[in-house]
Image: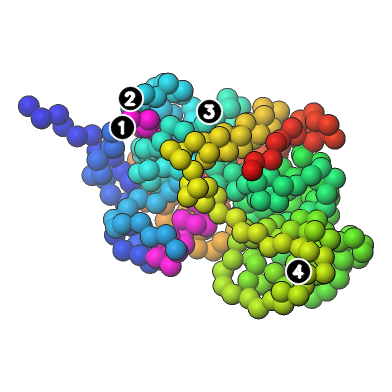
Amino acid sequence: MATRQKLMRAIRVFEFGGPEVLKLQSDVVVPVPKEHQVLIKVHACGINPVETYIRTGTYIRKPLLPYTPGTDVAGVIESIGNNVSAFKKGDRVFTNNTISGGYAEYALAEDHTVYALPDQLDFKQGAAIGIPYFTACRALFHSARVKAGEKILVHGASGGVGLATCQIARAYGLQVLGTAGSEEGRKIVLQNGAHEVFDHKEADYINKIQKSVGEKGIDVIIEMLSNVNLNNDLKLLSYGGRVIVVGCRGSIEINPRDTMAKETSIIGVALFSSTKVIKEGILMLEEFKQFASVLQAGMEIAEVIEVEDKTCASRVSESKIVRKATHMSHGPSEECTLGYAYGAQPVRAYLKLLAQPGEKGGMQVQAVH
């Protein structure tokens, strides 16, 4: 007699478009973990900007339809596949890369993309870690190769990656400047590690930054909207300074001569680009494990603060639809774990990382090459 397949609820996308294409299905088959895979009972999922870009069909990467969105989840191990030794049923975990999609009651993930969730963090906070914090780590340590004592500007600091960058940069011993477009956003940026914050909606804010940093300029700029800010970024850099492009929503014209006199660099960041230059997942595994270790060490003594992130209107709309859909039948409960779908939108929990002892008072982090 054939074994009856277990079903779950999940958000499915059958066509690309706006948030309205997110459809709740109650008859989706629960995936079964294969070798080196785990099945996570999802208690919270993150909604990142990239999820909304993919859903519209305009992103460079398009999944096969239909699909379940979502990469960042936190929950409990439900079952494991063969050759999984790091986890067991019942372990509290988070991941930044699901296989089957995170907007669901259960999500499948490769075991090397799953990490233990510290006991003092709840699942909503765990779902806020993945893409924002790992992107911040990659930008700072892999791409910018920051050094304690350098000046860093987080250009657009009040979003998920921006706040994570401020926290980690401050803990690492950098002089942190940030920008935000609202009074509330600037207050949050200061609360999350920035020494100074500027209003990027003011016409003369670039002059104010230049006055603050002096003639030397800024060593590293983490840029969230390069199609608007890149030209100004190049004028703010110090000799040998680096602009790290995390976000871009279009094109911009720059004068390459602006990079020559000070021998500055423009470097792009994509969190999962390392998968293209690895063999059997080994390099990505080590790099991400290092990032996870840095974050987990900070979380062990972290002060947890919750803030609202309204920086992406499409993401806010998506979160409302996901939450409304998941409350249709049962509402939030242990039996209906998808009801806890908060993620990056509009309620997101950020972790305030504190400095770990190091040679210069910052965290002990070895740059990833």
Q: Which-is-in-front pick, marks 3 and 4?
A: 4
Whole-percent x, y for residue 251 in the image: 59, 75
Residue at 86% from the left image edge and 71% from the top image edge: 207
The reply, left or right, for residue 282 in relation to residue 165 is left
Say which residue label 4 marks: 259
Are the residues at dot 2 and dot 3 in contact (C-beta closer than 8 Å)?
A: no
The local secondary structure at tag 4 comes to helix
Q: Which-is-in-front pick, marks 2 and 4?
A: 4
What amino acid is found at the position of numbered circle 1 in the picture?
Answer: Lys
Estimate the spatial distance between the alpha carbons at disc 4 and disc 1, rounded to whole Å: 49 Å
Whole-percent x, y for residue 288 in the image: 56, 38
Say which residue label 2 marks: 82
Estimate the spatial distance between the alpha carbons at disc 2 and disc 1, rounded to whole Å: 6 Å
Estimate the spatial distance between the alpha carbons at disc 3 and disc 1, rounded to whole Å: 20 Å
Say which residue label 3 marks: 116
Q: Earlier in the sequence, mark 2 or mark 3?
A: 2
The reply, left or right, for residue 84 in relation to residue 218 is left
What amino acid is found at the position of numbered circle 3 in the picture?
Answer: Ala
Say which residue label 1 marks: 34
Q: Nearer the viewer, residue 263 or 152?
A: 263
The residue carrying pointer 3 sits among few (fewer than 14), some (14 to 19) or many (20 or more) residues within 10 Å by Cα, namely: some
What amino acid is found at the position of numbered circle 2 in the picture?
Answer: Asn
Q: Which stretch did the figure color magenta?
A: 33-59
What amino acid is found at the position of numbered circle 4 in the picture?
Answer: Thr
The local secondary structure at tag 3 comes to strand
Q: Nearer the viewer, residue 235 or 337?
A: 235
Are the residues at dot 3 and dot 4 in contact (C-beta closer than 8 Å)?
A: no
Kindly tell me whether residue 345 is visible in this rendering.
no
Estimate the spatial distance between the alpha carbons at disc 2 and disc 4, rounded to whole Å: 52 Å
Whole-percent x, y for residue 260 in the image: 78, 69
